[in-house]
Amino acid sequence: MQYTDPVFLLQQLLRCRSVTPDESGSFSFLQECAEKMNFMVKRPVFHDYGTADVENFYAKCGNTGPHLMFAGHTDVVPPGDETCWKYPPFAGDIVDGILYGRGAVDMKGGIACFFAALARTIQKKPIKGTVSLLITSDEEGPAINGTAKLLQWATDRGEKWDAALVGEPTCSESLGDTIKIGRRGSLSGILTVHGRQGHVAYPHLANNPLPGIITLLGGLLSKPFDNGSDNFQPSNLELTNIETTNQACNVIPAEVKANFNIRFNDRWSAETLKAEIEQRLNKTAKTISSSNGDKLSLNYTIAWMPNPASVFLTHDRQIINAISGAITKIVDNKPRFSTSGGTSDARFIKDYCPVVEFGLVGKTMHKTDECVPVDDLEMLIAIYQHFIEQFFAG
């Protein structure tokens, strides 16, 4: 049966050019696979003002407890300049035991392995419980019409889950070295300093916003937000862009914008962090105005991006022990529990049930020549299969 073969499954998924938010045929292929295993499949489309419509995938098999959710996404980031790839990003070529393609590890590989693990498990004996597959094509995008709405849609239809596994590429060096049991929060903002445009030779007739934003950012970054906590590394703010619309060397710009993102730990919420950032900016702005004698006051605004990700930590021992025990059984390695890295759709799932993340090695995710060793696929299937068996056994 081809649906137990991870190479076949992954190659078919990689050949779908599913750059977010397009599913590009990946859901039709997954539906074919799921229905062969007696899953009932629904593919709701969600909408929101100012965003693209997004199709999602929900499949379910069984009606008794316990209920395990496997979650993931088939959408991928753009491949960039395809001429820079050794092998085409949407071909699924295998060279020297390595399978290449955009999404190979993030995270079509995880989906292929979970499907294959399910198929192999069901071949051995029926699962005594319920499995659902919750897959979106909006994880790499704004994440507005994807998992968050799919979870609510399923809940409105009576769905309840006991635990969830997200197949993101969690491992750093070798398969089995890391499980994600939580994630930092994520908050993004745009700081704009408003000035007055003018000729560089007549600065007294203008108000240059660039020195102002440099000083404001200095005040924002002048001291750490915290020193970390028991389970999380220190919160970290990174500047991601500074720009003006000015293209001339002899013109003082009218305004300048700075984009930033902060990954924060459990010492903060999005709201307390916003308050801290605004307080730092206000304090610095007063210092600037005082030094100028209020001659040229600093005029700035801050806009917060919607849907900040909240920090979370999973404490449920059943699912943590099930996946860590499966890893130890298959690769003879005790995995590290981690909360590092970026965000994932686990930030939405944690509001519905305990959730952990485990998948392939993420070294090549989002890079040119993203790839996965074929041997890692078979190893991940064995881990997932043992995890499934242990979860429903206990």
Image (cartoon, helix red, strand yellow):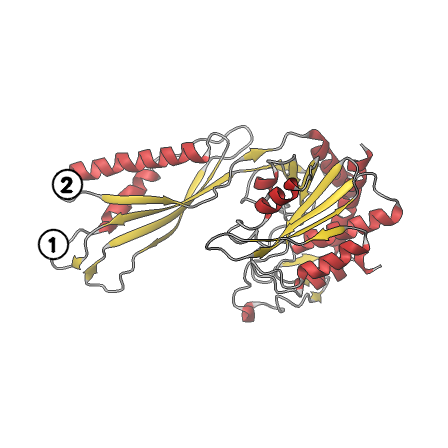
Secondary structure type for disc 1: helix
Of mark 2 and mark 1, the one earlier in the sequence is 1
Residue drawn at 26 percent across, 53 percent down: 255
Residue type at tag 1: Leu
As measured in the structure, the alpha-carbon distance from the residue carrying label 2 to the one carrying label 1 is: 15 Å
Q: In the visual, does 199 lie left or right of 31?
A: left
Comparing 159 with 347, the one in front is 159
Look at the image and tell me in which quarter the N terminus lies. bottom right
Residue drawn at 76 percent across, 54 percent down: 34
Question: Crowding near pointer 1: few (<14 within 10 Å), some, many (20+)?
Answer: few
Residue furthest right in the image: 124
Residue type at tag 2: Asn
Residue 218 sits above or below residue 29 on the image: above
Mark number displayed over residue 292: 2
Comparing 369 with 277, the one in front is 277
**Residue 220 horizontal/vertical position (percent):** 33, 39
**Residue 264 horizontal/vertical position (percent):** 47, 37
Residue drawn at 58 percent across, 50 percent down: 146
**Residue 238 horizontal/vertical position (percent):** 41, 45
**Residue 46 horizontal/vertical position (percent):** 57, 52
Residue drawn at 60 percent across, 52 percent down: 363
Asked whether the viewer can see residue 98, the reply is no
Mark number displayed over residue 205: 1
Q: In the visual, does 217 lie left or right of 266?
A: left
Asked whether the viewer can see residue 277, the reply is yes
Residue furthest front in the image: 157
